[in-house]
Amino acid sequence: MAFKPRIGVFICHCGENIAGTVDVSNLAEEIIGYDNVSFSTDYEYMCSDPGQNKIKEAIEEENLTGVVVAACSPSMHEDTFRRVVEEADLNRYQCEIANIREQCSWVHGEGNDRPTEKALKIIKGTVEKVKRNVSMEPVEREHSDKCLVIGGGIAGIQAALDVAEAGNEVILVEKSPTIGGHMAQLSETFPTLDCSQCILTPKMVEVNQHPNIELMAYSEVRGISGYVGNYRARIERKPTYVDADACNLCGDCEEVCPVEVTDEFNQGLDTRKAINIPFSQAIPSSYTLDTEACLGLNPLRCSECAEACDADAINFDQTSEYVEEEFGAIIAATGYDLYPKEKMGEYGYGEYDDVIDGLQFERLLSATGPTGGEVRRPSDGKVPENVVFIQCSGSRDPENHNSYCSKICCMYTAKHAKLYRETVPDGNAYVFYIDIRAGGKDYEEFIQNVREEDRVLYLKGKVSKLKKADGKMKVWGLDEISGERVEIDADLVVLAQSIIPSEGAEETSEHLNLNLGANGFFKEAHPKLRPVESLTGGVFYAGTGQGPKDIPDSVSQGSGAAAKAIDLLAKPTLSHDPQVVEIDEDLCSGCGLCVGQCPYDALDINSKGVAEVNELLCEGCGTCASGCPTNALSLRNLTDEQLTEMIHAHIGD
Amino acid sequence: MDLTNSDRELTANVEELSGENIFSCYQCGKCSAGCPFTEEMDILPNQVIKKVQMGDGSVLDSDTPWTCASCLSCEVDCPKGNDVPAIMEAIREISLRKNLDRVDINKLETKGLPEIALVSNLRKKTG
Ligand SMILES: Cc1cc2nc3c(=O)[nH]c(=O)nc-3n(C[C@H](O)[C@H](O)[C@H](O)COP(=O)(O)OP(=O)(O)OC[C@H]3O[C@@H](n4cnc5c(N)ncnc54)[C@H](O)[C@@H]3O)c2cc1C
Ligand code: SF4
Ligand code: SF4
Ligand code: SF4
């Protein structure tokens, strides 16, 4: 006896979303007479527990061989309903979604029969498909259980430690000579004011000592190929010209080096030598020779440092090393930078010495900074008596700068004003703000304390411009509350510059085909429900590369990304959707057209001279199938016959 | 206004006389929202406080502290527990000590004015 499909149709009201426009009970009645449909019903929310149970019961009682759920888009609940049919011992590929919400009720008005007629056609088309579906099992494959973390700021550090603790090997790639990122530059951290380095350096040391972490500092990812579970990355280890194991940090090399250049770690407020260590607790704890600053290695122009080094740690013959490794998962933690103050025309284009940005002020406040923690202004070393802090500098300004709020600068500005008032008790601190955003735990209390106890004068309004006169900066501002225009002769102005993604975001997105949002931050797979995942399988985000964040949020996201990576790496095998392309070797002429068309590099012409598909790479897009001149290719469960019958059902003949 | 050379003494005096930390006010505006007399005031009670925070001497020219009836509605409302009427009183005291005169008796239309009003004005003149 020939196989006779028994299809069940389950129509969801989605509250009023579908039922408000489409006559759902009428649909259930109409469809029952249709070819092979032996059961139908409608329900308020099919995705709810009772809704799911209806499906399971009907499969068992009615002996269904296929299921159509007429509901929302398959991108919402296809997986949910396929799991439901599996629980009732039906193959998951015997369940299909008829989208009568996004493609019908939401886009058509109520008050006439046409949405109902259209929904009926969509359902009939889906019935035509599902009754011809074949049962399949997912393709299982092996994967690497290593994790690559790109960026060694606090977010990357946290992610690396968590993944390593779970027993997976991690390679942490950091571009600069040390890990720590911007947190290493901070003085004290809001809202508890613990010293940044004191809480950071133990974690940096842990990374260095963890048996499961291989730290590659002063290194960069040069290329990544592959797919979730099986990425292959090529990493360049740049030469530091110093053997980190031999270097004993005596600093003799630094002393004799004749070259001084601006010190990035101190945000340009100081100079460093061509051979240097960014700060004393840097990890790896070793010196790095900056070839751009050095008088020359090729030919050797100076070599003072090598001569001074008693440990013989300096080796001018080092060259870049390239390492290739396989990774199952990748965490992108490339962090942030500040929007350049050079772009702030209204605040002097970065040309005034005494107009500095927030990170520069952190260095002035830091005990290890260029002034040893005394607040002295850059131009003449004077202790400033009147300090003006300008919030939202470069943020919330869609016309000239960035439209978004940088989220952390209200808090760090309050911290700056407080620390300034503590170091210079006679000084006056003025904060210009649009509004104060202090939504974190204990943050509002922190701000109130700064206003009340540190007597920082908050003025509501943005500063219109700065002008230099008599060694002071004339600040033109407003206080909206009193309605007064105000002028301040400031000795120092601190700009709370906008947070922007570091260059690492774009570099990483190019390697991995990641989406960036309009402002250049990594774009999440879903802004609310999948905030640490990218749309590229196995790639996760941590920290400020995804959007402005403070330390607690960066650490949380680091742990979140780690959990996602661990979850993936812990799977014994990864499964791949079997809805891939199939090749009829008898029809294939071996022309190779499809090989060039496949966007995933999944096709090849094999030794038999016919096309062959790598099922792990094929995403089932169908580009090749529609282009094959001999019709040798077809997609599983989306064959030409299925498509034709679906079209007939849709146009109603 | 020139904030660098603002009247910091005024701020200190108001704090001393009122016993309040003027910087405790975070400008929510609730005092003004509930004040029954704002229609008669030239600036709002919260603006009075802001001006004192800023050391803005023009607050002494404002009607508001004199219109304030010390009804205490704002004090009850204030989420920070500020005693706004005490701040108004402090400003009135500072104005009085400056001997600033808000009424010129010679120019007063005395007809129909209660005697007691005249007497109290004269008494203020004689200290
Ligand atoms: C002035 C100021 C004060 C602040 N004060 C506080 C505070 O008091 N409390 C608080 O909670 N937060 C504070 N913050 C916020 C805090 O700095 C951040 O939340 C935190 O440092 C973010 O860490 P991250 O790891 O995401 O990024 P980052 O610290 O930027 O680290 C990113 C790392 O990735 C590396 N990298 C970049 N691109 C690549 C690449 N292509 N390959 C390899 N490596 C790469 C970078 O070199 C860097 O080491 C402050 C911020 C500022 C600007
Ligand atoms: S966090 Fe505050 S200072 Fe920073 S952009 Fe947002 S509102 Fe402005
Ligand atoms: S005490 Fe004065 S300021 Fe406060 S509500 Fe009453 S009248 Fe207004
Ligand atoms: S209610 Fe209190 S905190 Fe709010 S503006 Fe008035 S005095 Fe300030």
Image (cartoon, grey):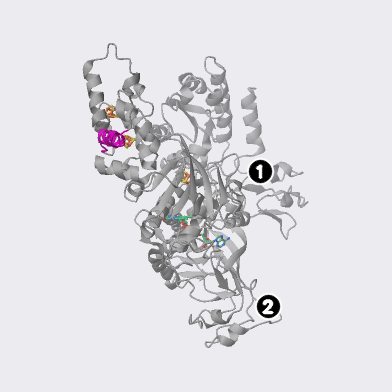
Indicate the quadrant containing the C terminus of chain A: top left, top right, bottom left or bottom right: top right
Q: Label 1: few (<14), some or many (≥20) within 10 Å?
A: some
Vertical placement of A620 versus A538: above or below?
above
Q: Give the range drawn in magenta.
A: B81-99
Side of A349 where A284 appears, left or right = left
Pointer 2 residue Cβ closer than 8 Å to ligand 1: no
* Chain to which mark 1 belongs: A
**Residue at (57%, 27%) from the top-left corner?**
A122
Vertical placement of A169 versus B59: above or below?
below
**Residue at (68%, 77%) from the top-left corner?**
A296
**Residue at (49%, 58%) from the top-left corner?**
A359
Q: Residue furthest top?
A: B112
Q: Which amino acid does label 1 sit on?
A: Gly
Can residue A498 be seen in this snapshot?
A: no
**Front of the two marks 1 and 2:** 2
Residue A73: x %, y % from top left: 52, 34
Can residue A63 be seen in this snapshot?
A: yes
Q: Circle 2 sits on which residue? A: A296
Q: Specify whether disc 1 shares its chain with disc 2.
A: yes
